[in-house]
Image (cartoon, rainbow, N blue to C red):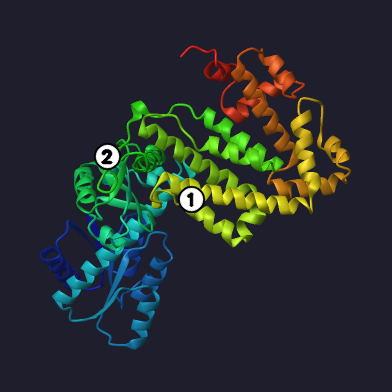
Amino acid sequence: MITIVVADDEKLIRAGIKKILMDNVSADLNVIEAKNGKEALDYIKENSTDVLITDIKMPVMDGVELMENVRELPRKPAMIVLSGFDDFNYAKVAISSGVLAYILKPVDSKELCTAVNSALNSAKKIEKSQTELKLKSLIIEGGSRGIDELKDINMFHGFCCVTVKIPSGMNDENFYSILDPNLCYVLEKKKHLAGLVIQKDYLEEIISLVKKNGCTAGISTCSDNVVDLRKLYHQSCSSVLRFFFEDEQFGSVFTYDAESSVSDFSEIDLRYEKFIAALDLLSENEIKKAMSNLLEFDYADSGKKAESVLYVHDKLVSNLFKRYPKFHDNDTYLYLKSLMIENIVQVDSYDEWKHYIGDYVIYLTQLLIKQQGKYPYITKAISYVNRHYSENITMATVANYVSMNYTWFSEKFKEQVGTNFNDYLKKFRMEQAKRLLEMGTYKVYEVANKSGFRDVKHFMKTFRELNGMSAGEWAKIHSRYSED
């Protein structure tokens, strides 16, 4: 229901405006009358209001003061001014207060209704834009913050996410123009890419539009719980990536299948850590080998391949791109390649995407090797950690080994590696612990000792903090000798 507040000190004028609106505006209206600005302001503060129609001259609080107060409210209605005073000063105040229309009395019904319809459309666009920002925030941050503000949206009685790859021959705006704005929110809008959240009842029409216009879409499962939004958006993104691995591409619709999804990404995590270790040691052959291993998947199922590719994509964007900020942020070539890698849905094939990663990594390696001439002790320090992580080493031990001042070494290590030494050592030891647990031949206390943790309790606490489960639970799940 649309709520409109009419503020005027003349009862007959209020009644006349109400009748004009009820007879001519095609919407379910709730028209509230207020005989002065204070009554109108009190109501608007306590109730959701879409449009305020106000006279200028009123007792207690006039229209100018009312507009100034309304302008400061967190959720302000669209404002229309009615006045018998053809005075430019009033018009200036109205415009500065964000008024959409300034109408002189006697009121022309057609002019009034046009202004109200314009105000309602403007209010809808603003509200929709604010909702989309909240939805994007939920996807980026996760959790449930701000969800209460979204629960009243009709869409969330049943919704799903759709990621659409728009063909290069189609104008993006033409695609958005065919969508129903009342049933669809835009979560991501990039060149040839649309991320949508839609009402479940709109799904069949979206599928029809996608096929008719030669687009490719990935569709998530459905839910009525806004908390699931981030998960569903991720599902739609992984589903659309199936076009990498299936013959049918443009005009295809891929639906997420929860039953055949990847349940464990630990193998990819291990491959990624080996890739980073090779990059840290600047071993070009090992880097290429580890990178190739990271990007190859044995799944026969295209859905699992697509999920794994998206998982690698997220690791690169959230980890690798932030690992060397000095290069990533300041080198134009590296930055442009990172954009190509990040915009994975916009590329035409998996081989093309892998090529972008190869270009990025090879160029980054050369930058790091060139830097090595200036800071060779960083590579030497990392090599020392690789050989002696199981021993009782500290940053002081390593700084002494490379003959560097402790404070200077600490500063340069973080600057070049992207993390402080103690965090690097802890994470490296943890990866070795996970590798030992995977072998299934060592007890937890033996794993702790062999990976450099002298205190078993500290190891167990750290393991749970970093991996979300105990070392024993991890071993049961990932041991090569565990039962399926």
Residue at point 68%, 46% (across, down): 418
Q: Amino acid at mark 1?
A: Glu
Nearest the viewer among 172 and 7 is: 172
Could you tell me if residue 9 is visible in this image? yes
Is residue 60 positioned above or below 388 on the image? below
Residue at point 78%, 52% (across, down): 373
Q: Amino acid at mark 2?
A: His
Q: Position of residue 409 (x, y in %)?
A: 82, 46
Q: Secondary structure at mark 2?
A: helix
Is residue 255 positioned above or below 2 on the image? above
Position of residue 24 in the picture relative to residue 138 (left or right):
left
Q: Position of residue 250 (x, y in %)?
A: 28, 49
Q: Nearer the viewer, mark 1 or mark 2?
A: 1
Residue 93 falls in which quadrant of the image? bottom left
Position of residue 249 in the picture relative to residue 370 (left or right):
left
Residue 69 falls in which quadrant of the image? bottom left
Quadrant for the N terminus, please.
bottom left
- Sequence-first tag of 1 and 2: 2
Q: In the rendered image, which residue does mark 2 sit on?
A: 157
Q: In the rendered image, which residue does mark 1 sit on?
A: 342
Nearest the viewer among 165 and 103 is: 165
Q: Secondary structure at mark 1?
A: helix
